[in-house]
Image (cartoon, rainbow, N blue to C red):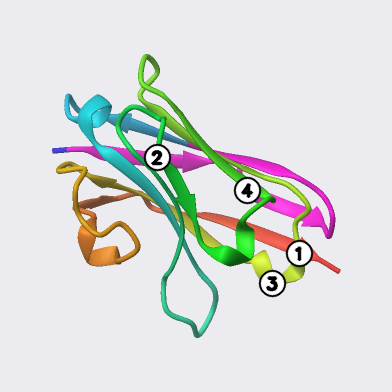
Amino acid sequence: QVQLVESGGGLVQAGGSLRLSCAASGRTFSSSAMGWFRQAPGKEREFVARIDWSGRSTYYVDSVKGRFTISRDNAKNTVYLQMNSLKPEDTAVYYCAVDPTGIRRGVLPSSYDYWGQGTQVTVSS
């Protein structure tokens, strides 16, 4: 069993920055791929970013490329999402998730077995 706890959300003005953290418990963290998703009111959960177990391979949804950076510290069992140049359309609840296999198609929510409770990010214009 893996438990995930996100933190770092909040209210920020457009153009500002936030760093989300996701602390994981469980022995599978260092061998798992990790993802960030977001869900705005009335919308489906959307893939944001993914990082492989080593941290060497990452990819992003086009709308955040060049603005967001996903990283991980396996010694701390933590994955991060650095968000810069935030826009009002980035407003959503952000979730981290674990793919213990590391080999699934990472843009689908169904590829992930464990989810955090979410953290709210609100970007004002």
Of the residues tagged 4 and 3, which is closer to the observer? 4
> Is-magenta flag for residue 66?
no
Q: First in sequence, mark 1 or 4: give its number.
A: 4
Mark 4 vs 2, N-terminal side: 2
Which callout, 2 or 1, points to the residue nearer the camera?
1
Left or right: residue 49 compared with residue 27: right
Q: Is residue 13 left or right of residue 42?
A: right
Amino acid type, callout 1: Lys
Residue pointed to by mark 2: 5
Q: Position of residue 115 (x, y in %)?
A: 30, 52
Nearer the viewer's eye, disc 2 or disc 3?
3
Q: Amino acid at mark 4?
A: Phe
Mark 3 = which residue? 89
The image quarter in which residue 123 lies: bottom right
Which amino acid, by three-letter code, is at mark 3? Glu
Q: Are marks 3 and 1 in contact (CB under 8 Å)?
A: yes
Report the front residue among 96 and 68: 68
- On the image, numbered disc 4 is attached to which residue? 68
Q: Earlier in the sequence, mark 4 or mark 3?
A: 4
